[in-house]
Amino acid sequence: MIDYSQMSLSLKIIKPKDTAVLRQRVLRPHQSLEDMVYPNDLVDGATHIGAFEGDVLVGIVSIYPGTEDGDVLQRKIWRLRGMATTPEVRGKGYGKSLVEKAFKEARNLGGELMWCNARTTACGFYLNFGFQKKGDEFDIEGIGPHYVM
């Protein structure tokens, strides 16, 4: 067992493949590691951020240029996706740090607006950053209820 109380947070840009294990463990345990490769992971500008305790990856988030309909040419609009932290570090501000870093990276790449599909249970987290619910709740099969924010 890792003692997280003696470590400190660091944020780093990571490779898309480095997100797969945590995506599966936290977000989609019923899917294979191969399913953890998201369609826009390798598009120009896609950025993947890892939160580390020492050398242990404990949180991830990815951002992609693009609109809600998947138009990856729209550089002013960015999608936040695959946000996850391990249960051991929840409530310590790691998720907040990841989202703040994602905003900074998107702004540095010309982004002016960020959107995401948020699990209904996580809407409060995103509301704290200024996200707003758009439309009705919808269900992603096998994953659960979400809102566009």
Image: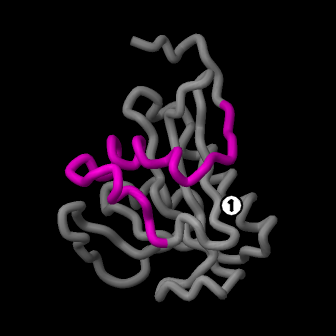
Query: In the figure, 75 relative to 36: above or below?
Result: below
Give the left or right position of residue 28, taking residue 6 as reference.
Answer: left
Please tell me how crowded label 1 is: few (under 14), some (14-19), or many (20+) other residues with Cα within 10 Å: many
Query: In the figure, 17 relative to 67: above or below?
Result: above
Residue 140: image x %, image y %? Answer: 25, 70
Give the left or right position of residue 137, taking residue 102 as reference.
Answer: left
Nearer-the-camera pick, 49 or 124: 49
Residue 19 is one of the magenta-drawn residues: yes
> Which residue is rendered at x = 59% and y = 42% of the image?
50
Nearer-the-camera pick, 47 or 18: 18
Residue 92: image x %, image y %? Answer: 53, 31
Query: In the figure, 91 relative to 45: above or below?
Result: above
Quarter of the image with the N terminus is top left
Residue bearing the label numbered 1: 103
> Which residue is rendered at x = 65% and y = 57% of the image?
102
Nearer-the-camera pick, 128 or 145: 145
Residue 83 is one of the magenta-drawn residues: no
User: In terms of image quadrants, where is residue 74?
Assistant: bottom right
> Which residue is rendered at x = 22% and y = 63% of the image?
144
As shown in the figure, which amino acid type bears the numbered disc 1?
Answer: Phe
Which secondary structure lies at badge 1? helix
Nearer-the-camera pick, 69 or 136: 69
Residue 107: image x %, image y %? Answer: 76, 67
Give the left or right position of residue 77, taking residue 148 as reference.
Answer: right
| Start-end of magenta stretch | 10-39
Give the left or right position of residue 75, taking residue 135 as reference.
Answer: right
Count of picture labels:
1
Residue 6: image x %, image y %? Answer: 59, 11
Query: In the figure, 138 relative to 122: above or below?
Result: below
